[in-house]
Amino acid sequence: MTTKTPVTFQHIADAHKRIASIISNTPIVESSLLNKWLGHRILFKAECLQKTGAFKMRGACNVLAHLSELGQLPKRIVANSSGNHAQAVAFAAAHFNIPATIFTASNVSVVKAAATEYYGAEVLKFPTRLQADAAVAEAAKEEGTLWIPPYNHNDIIAGQGTAAYEALQELQNVDLVAAPCGGGGLLSGSLIATRELAPHAKVIGAEPLMANDAARSLRLGKIVGLEKPAVTFADGAATPMVGELTFPYLQQTDGFYEVDENRIAYWTQWLQHLLKLHIEPTCAMTMEAVVQWLIEQKPSEPQTVLVLISGGNIAETMMRAVWQEDHLQTLPSLNVSTAQEAQNLAS
């Protein structure tokens, strides 16, 4: 499934069936205080409690589980990543007893690199990400070697879609599904699952303003990449560009929001505080998209919102940077002036 053939709901259902025994069916949590303050019910699919600490497990496992079904498992696996995808590939490769090598830049998080090695993968570091990408492309040419990309692969999209699939099988009357967007795999899979299981629900995405290649691509109607490496709290969404397979799904979303660093830090602090979970800034920023959507819609009835908490792997240095300013002095609300202030900061 590496062609441009569309991913269907059946692909996601099949993916969930084949990986159910490998992954964790993560819980759905909520905060009564947050619900009270916003006047709506906000539910969180806690993929931060997934094995390896992120939703990436679902896609990586689906690629190899599908190949196993077909009797086509490779002799070796390679991948280029500096974070959650690396750990997911390492775990999945170990599960299927296949050696794996991860190619990454030398500035990779020490914690994430160590975790990747713990799961059994070899980690090769290069001076820059471009050099790492070139090296993995060369390694992928070796016979019997499979290169597992982080998002631009149909089995990855289908696997990532199982998070929303699980949640929407459990929940009823969801009005909005919201997910972060890096390369677009999670948001694409969530869109496909939602259109089938909750067809009346809207689907929106969130992206850091400092790494807004997806938003710019959507405005232009064609894929454009970042002009330089992004520096953002939401490092999991700082991908150079979305994939040619994911972009058509992003174009079908019902809203896409760019979030400035102040609001990413704000929601990281508040969600960690309210949910008592270790939550990455990449997924915490999705709450700002939810708030903006609710303000724009001005719904007359309370809405039920599903937010995909994509991961919980955050380095100590990033945690200190996020908490440098105390945002807990300002309560979450749908106050338009608060939203306008955020817009002003973003402009």
Image: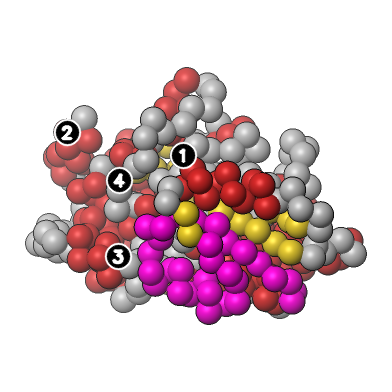
Q: Foreground mark, 3 or 1?
A: 1
Asked whether 147 or 279 is in front, the reply is 147
| Res. 172 visible in picture | no
**Residue where numbered disc 1 is placed:** 240
- Gap in angstroms between the C-alphas marked 1 and 4: 12 Å
Residue furthest front in the image:
127
Marks 4 and 2, the one that precedes in the sequence = 4
Residue furthest right in the image:
71
* Residue at image location 53% in from the left, 38% down from the top: 242
Residue furthest top in the image:
220
Badge 1 local density, few (<14 within 10 Å), some, or many (20+)?
some
Where are the magenta residues, as a range?
96-124
Marks 3 and 1, the one that precedes in the sequence = 1
Disc number placed over residue 231 in the picture, else none: 4
Query: Measured from the top left, where is residue 163 in percent x and y?
Result: 58, 62
**Residue where numbered disc 2 is placed:** 344
- Gap in angstroms between the C-alphas marked 1 and 2: 26 Å
Which amino acid, by three-letter code, is at mark 1? Pro
Judge whether 285 appears above or below 114 on screen.
above
Which amino acid, by three-letter code, is at mark 2? Asn
Asked whether 210 or 347 is in front, the reply is 210
Magenta span contains residue 262: no
323 left or right, relative to 279: left
Magenta span contains residue 98: yes
- Gap in angstroms between the C-alphas marked 3 and 1: 27 Å
